[in-house]
Amino acid sequence: MPHEEIHLSDDDEESTPKATPTKANSTAPISPRTRAAKQPHWVGQLNKSAEKRRRKLSAGDHAIASAITDFSNGIIEIEKMKLRVTEKIIESGKQGREMVLQGQLQKTTLFAEVLKAKGQS
């Protein structure tokens, strides 16, 4: 009887068409991904390396975004400083004009007092 079972198996092979060679039954090297599908411990290693690449990419992206943000913040700070300097210049100009006007007023007042004193004498 066991011989009949083998014979039936042989009949099954003859009735099925010959399969074309695939990666699974060819002599070509198997890619790591195909090997990973056959060997579950490889899947974890591939996932770890993919995660490392994602981390490196996101770390690089984060570094670039951080540098751009720092640069933008630096520009904003420079503009704020320029505004403060401009305000100080304007304020100094106002104070300078006020000082000039006060000086002219004092000279005029002094001159008026001198004229009054001469007129009274």
Image (cartoon, rainbow, N blue to C red):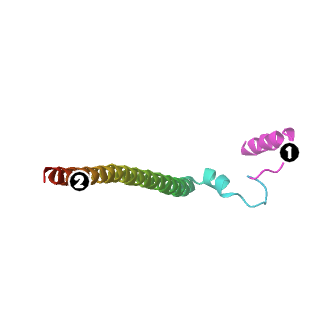
- Quadrant placement of the C terminus: bottom left
Magenta span contains residue 103: no
Question: Which mark's residue is nearer the viewer, 2 or 1?
Answer: 2
- 100 sits left or right of 12 in the view: left
- What span is colored magenta in the figure? 1-23
Task: Assign the magenta stretch its main secondary structure.
Answer: helix
Q: Amino acid at mark 1?
A: Lys
Give percent across and percent down for residue 115: 21, 52
Q: Kindly identify which numbered label has been placed on residue 18.
A: 1
**Residue 65, percent across and down?**
50, 52
Of residue 77 and residue 49, the one placed in the foreground of this image is: 77
Q: x, y (%) of residue 68? A: 50, 53
Q: Residue at x 55, y 56 (%)?
A: 53
Query: Quick one: 118 or 91, which is closer to the camera?
Result: 118
Residue 72 visible here: yes
Give residue 6's quadrant in the image: top right
Residue that lies at the very extreme toward the front in this rendered image: 121
Q: Along the line of sight, which residue is nearer the eye, 82 or 76?
A: 82
User: For mark 2, does the 10 Å Cα neighbourhood hold few (<14), some (14 to 19), or many (20 or more) residues?
Assistant: few
Q: Is residue 85 left or right of residue 31?
A: left
The residue where tag 2 is placed is: 111
Give coordinates of residue 67: x percent, y percent. 48, 57
Residue toward you, 113 or 104: 113
Q: Are marks 2 and 1 in contact (CB under 8 Å)?
A: no
- Is 7 situated left or right of 99 in this image? right
Element type at marker 1?
loop
